[in-house]
Image (cartoon, rainbow, N blue to C red):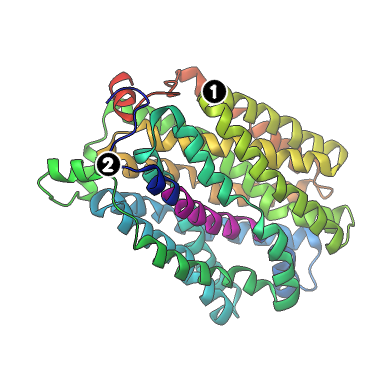
Amino acid sequence: MESGEQSPKVSKNYLIFLVLVMGLVSSMDTWLSMIEIKAIPNILDEWWPTALDEVARSEFAFLQGIFGLIVFGVFFIGWYADAYGRRKGMMLLILIMGAPTIMIVYLSADLYVFLLFYSIMIMGTTSNLWEIPISEEAPAKSRGMYGSAAFLIGVIPIWAILGPTIIDSYGWRWGYGVMFLMMIVLFILLYFIKDPQRWKDTEHARDKKRLGVMEALRKLRPEDRKYIVIATIVYLTWTIAFKMATTFGGEYFTSVQGLTDQEFNSILTIAGLLLPVSALITGIMLDKIGRNLVLVLGSLGSVICYIGLGMTGMPAFFWGMYVFMAMVLAWIYVYLAEIFPTEVRATSVGVCVTGARFGYVVGPILSGVLLILFADMAGFWIIGGLLMLIPLVALAAKPLETRGKTLEEIEAER
């Protein structure tokens, strides 16, 4: 296949449908990841009604980190998609994301029960599996754009527009529970999704023998391990920093800055509206200027905005965080889905996101310490910004620039 040529087995209409469906999976992922910025103040009020704000925030962050150990199970979602197919892997993914949401509504009267369901749900949101079918079907010269298109659909700020209204009207539990309906819709749509031909070819090559967990890990080559380390460093850092922002952004503006819920809802809505703008711009840049430069711009912009928020408290820096952190996340989504060989692509991504999910342990625990040290949260944001310098270290390993190359060319050149 020539560079940039699209497989004749994939029609443009099907590719558009695939992007739409994967975009809806991304939207469910984004809602469940982001709605906590509105839900957390309500959770703290329910289970820490008499505690000092900084104590409540710190204790919740610590418990969130402990229960975050559950997210390491995300590796098995990736392996399952390599062993049993992308379609079945996606069905497992949305079940893991969706089923706990309705349990949060009806079975989470106890804090620890809530954290259990919450952590299982978050495990699903960490897989990034929805990018892989697009990467395997999209033409090389526009793979970044197609991948970012799904990301763009996912970050349309429905969560920022409807989420606060749902929580204010029906309680914070339904802020999560409404995604159970999305799970049902996605199960119906996934019925019409096919496994990519590239995955079918790898299945045929092993005579349809199921790929075992240990066998999948043994198939990882030295160059695979190199890119696992690079991607894990970037993703781990992003996870820690963005987890800090999404968990305690609402607390910062309402409890520290003294804004009302309605004032913060307005700030949050603008931040949400900037996410699809960032996704659109990033999708164009990924295919025009390359993956590595996008990572540099996203990381440096994030550093400036985190530190700016800590020093000034201005909402403009909070909005900038969403723009530039989304840029880094788009790089993660696109690059991870294209840099590994097809046979172990989802497994390799699973290893990356498993390593990155140390951020769901380290991030909350670090947050707990910083919230005690900096009651005004200024140092909290400044340190979060300095963390975003770390992804630039990964570029010292000279990762392959994949812009405009087919997956076969990428595998051969690594």
Query: Could you tell whether 165 is left or right of 113 in the image?
Result: right
Residue 43: which quarter of the image? bottom right
- Secondary structure of the residue carrying numbered label 1: helix
Q: Quickly name the residue at label 1.
A: 288
Measuring 67% from the left and 40% from the top, which residue is drawn there?
277
| Residue 385 seen in this snapshot | yes
Query: Is 27 inside the magenta-drawn segment?
Result: yes
Q: Is residue 58 above or below residue 230?
A: below
Residue 175 image position (x, y, % from top left)? 64, 69
How many neighbours does mark 1 have within 10 angstroms: few (below 14), some (14-19), or many (20 or more)? some
Residue 222 image position (x, y, % from top left)? 29, 26
Q: Which badge, 2 or 1, is on the more N-terminal residue? A: 2
Measuring 58% from the left and 78% from the top, which residue is drawn there?
105
Q: Which range of residues does the magenta coloring cover?
A: 18-35
Q: Quickly name the residue at label 2.
A: 9
Q: Is residue 365 above or below residue 168?
A: above
Q: Amino acid at mark 1?
A: Lys
Residue 318 image position (x, y, % from top left)? 77, 43
Q: Quadrant of the N terminus?
A: top left
Q: Amino acid at mark 2?
A: Lys
Query: Is 200 inside the magenta-drawn segment?
Result: no
Query: Could you tell whether 335 is left or right of 407 in the image?
Result: right
Q: Nearer the viewer, residue 256 or 96?
A: 96
Q: Is residue 259 above or below residue 106?
A: above
Q: Quadrant of the C terminus?
A: top left
Measuring 58% from the left and 54% from the top, which residue is drawn there?
30
